[in-house]
């Protein structure tokens, strides 16, 4: 995830048990953002924790002063709970960790640079209010927004339509700094241009991260293997997930029907299908060695894992597609809290809603394709994603860069408030879940294919589940030609942007 000492300790604990399946791959080892380097060494009596004095700071002019300038951040997002994700608004100290961290960060930046940070909110949904407001503002040349956060559906379209700056060209933003997510920087870069990314500056990207929750009582009741140990031993695979989920279904009221009154192996969310693709190490679309986007969905691994999962998910006595009955979170929270499912697939943002659950629960990364796979890969939800971007037409790009970089570098306490004080400190109930969260956040997947919605494959893989079909190959072939045409146009747009920037 981001740079906390707890991440290092947890990863060292896992490494000590020789769990090579959980170790970071070369790619992730090179690009995982923000791990602390002062890790404990065997034989040392103490380890100096990071302090305010030793934290790196933004490399900006020390005499930066913007005379009370109002720095406006446009915030738009999708949300299943009807709330726009805003990582900057905090009017006062309330005693709530995340709010207070936002407030203190904004005050610190304001005092350091003599600026005032304000936000403007809008809903998202692809070409929704968020996209429209940013694009109209850029076209009008009014430069109303110094910075913006938006979902991947919006940022992808904004970038290919030349409404965003290449963040790497914004003065004083150091994308190599530890407060920026290096995996996102790598995965989202096209032709060495990065138009949106994430890092410590936001926590909404963490909420948008996939996870699997499990019911400890049912694990004990059915005398099953400890899922934590399976993760640690590298045996937490799709086959094991299916095997365990298939063992607990029960017609609780004996009426001969399976409905919301009964027990299932897993409560499945539609978007799980995109996570199933990514957890196998595959992507809908990938940036190739030439720096261009190419379609990579139709691989042997993708076909195999989706075939296996679709076949499993068609059993309505084992898998409950809860969105067919209820599109908000009330039903799934009630059923999972009531011991009516062994597993639940959802986002990290749902975890706090289980805080009052009587039965113990745990958190896991998505399963692996097989035991030979080295890492556990976890998707950032495309619909729920939130990225940082800089609208084109900035009146003072240096000012924007300085303020943005200081905001990012001063967000350490925001990450800590989210990760340690809230998610780990209040919500999870055991040390093992904390270690699982470290694995999840260290191995996230940013899939451009989902953000650009090439070929409508997002809906395509979900509709197979929704309609109880298992026809991936025919679905893929139907949309392949159209998808590649859109990818060609997208690549052309990025080539033209590159040429315009380097005449």
Image: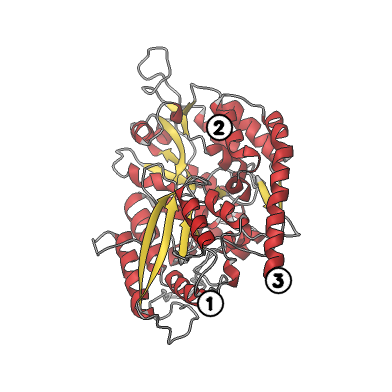
How far is mark 2 from mark 1, CA to CA? 49 Å
In the rendered view, does 109 fall on the left or right side of 435? left
Q: Residue 162 in the image: x percent, y percent?
A: 61, 59
In this view, which residue lies farthest toward the bottom? 63
Q: CA distance from mark 3 to mark 2?
A: 52 Å
Extreme residue in the right direction: 290
In primary-sequence order, the first of circles 2 and 1 is 1
Does residue 287 show up?
no
Residue 490 visible (yes or no): yes
The mark that comes first in sequence, 1 or 3, is 1
Which one is closest to the eye, mark 2 or mark 1?
1
Q: Is residue 289 above or below residue 271?
A: below
Q: Which residue is mark 3?
A: 502
Point out which mark residue 184 bears.
none
Q: Which residue is mark 2?
A: 242
Residue plotted at (51% across, 34% down): 270
């Amino acid at each position: 995830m981001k740079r906390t000492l707890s991440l290092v300790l947890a990863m060292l604990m896992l490494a000590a048990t020789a769990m090579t399946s959980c170790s970071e791959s070369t790619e992730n080892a090179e690009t995982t953002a923000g791990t602390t380097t002062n890790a404990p060494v065997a034989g040392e009596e103490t380890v100096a924790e990071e302090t305010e004095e030793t934290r790196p700071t933004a490399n900006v002019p020390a005499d930066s002063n913007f005379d009370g300038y109002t720095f406006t951040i446009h915030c738009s997002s999708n949300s299943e709970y009807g709330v726009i994700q805003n990582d900057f608004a905090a009017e006062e100290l309330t005693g709530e960790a995340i709010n207070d961290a936002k407030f203190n960060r904004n005050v610190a930046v304001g005092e350091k640079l003599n600026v005032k940070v304000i936000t403007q909110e809008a809903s998202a949904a692809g070409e929704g209010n968020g996209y429209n407001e940013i694009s109209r503002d850029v076209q009008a040349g009014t430069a109303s927004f110094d910075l913006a956060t938006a979902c991947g559906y919006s940022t992808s379209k904004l970038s290919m339509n030349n409404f965003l700056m290449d963040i790497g060209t914004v003065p004083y933003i150091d994308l190599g700094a530890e407060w920026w997510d290096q995996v996102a920087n790598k995965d989202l870069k096209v032709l060495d241009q990065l138009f949106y990314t994430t890092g410590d500056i936001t926590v909404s990207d963490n909420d948008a991260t996939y996870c699997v929750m499990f019911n400890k009582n049912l694990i004990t009741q059915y005398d099953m293997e400890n899922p934590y140990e399976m993760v640690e031993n590298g045996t937490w695979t799709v086959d094991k997930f299916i095997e365990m989920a298939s063992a607990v279904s029960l017609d609780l009221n004996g009426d001969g029907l399976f409905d919301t009154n009964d027990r299932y192996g897993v409560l499945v969310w539609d978007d799980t299908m995109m996570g199933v693709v990514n957890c196998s190490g595959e992507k809908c679309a990938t940036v190739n060695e030439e720096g261009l986007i190419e379609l990579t969905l139709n691989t042997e691994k993708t076909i195999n894992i989706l075939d296996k999962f679709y076949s499993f998910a068609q059993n309505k006595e084992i898998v409950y597609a809860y969105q067919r009955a209820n599109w908000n979170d009330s039903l799934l929270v009630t059923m999972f809290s009531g011991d009516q499912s062994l597993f639940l697939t959802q986002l990290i943002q749902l975890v706090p809603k289980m805080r009052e659950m009587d039965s113990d629960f745990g958190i896991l990364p998505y399963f692996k394709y097989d035991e030979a796979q080295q890492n556990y890969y976890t998707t950032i939800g495309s619909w729920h994603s939130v990225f940082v971007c800089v609208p084109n037409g900035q009146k003072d790009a240096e000012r924007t860069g300085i303020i943005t970089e200081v905001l990012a570098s001063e967000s350490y306490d925001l990450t800590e408030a989210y990760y340690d004080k809230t998610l780990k400190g209040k919500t999870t109930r055991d040390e093992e879940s904390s270690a699982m969260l470290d694995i999840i956040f260290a191995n996230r997947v940013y899939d451009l294919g989902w953000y650009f919605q090439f070929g409508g494959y997002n809906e395509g893989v979900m509709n197979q589940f929704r309609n109880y079909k298992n026809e991936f190959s025919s679905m893929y072939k139907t949309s392949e030609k159209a998808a590649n045409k859109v990818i060609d146009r997208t690549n052309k747009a990025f080539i033209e942007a590159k040429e315009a920037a380097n005449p």
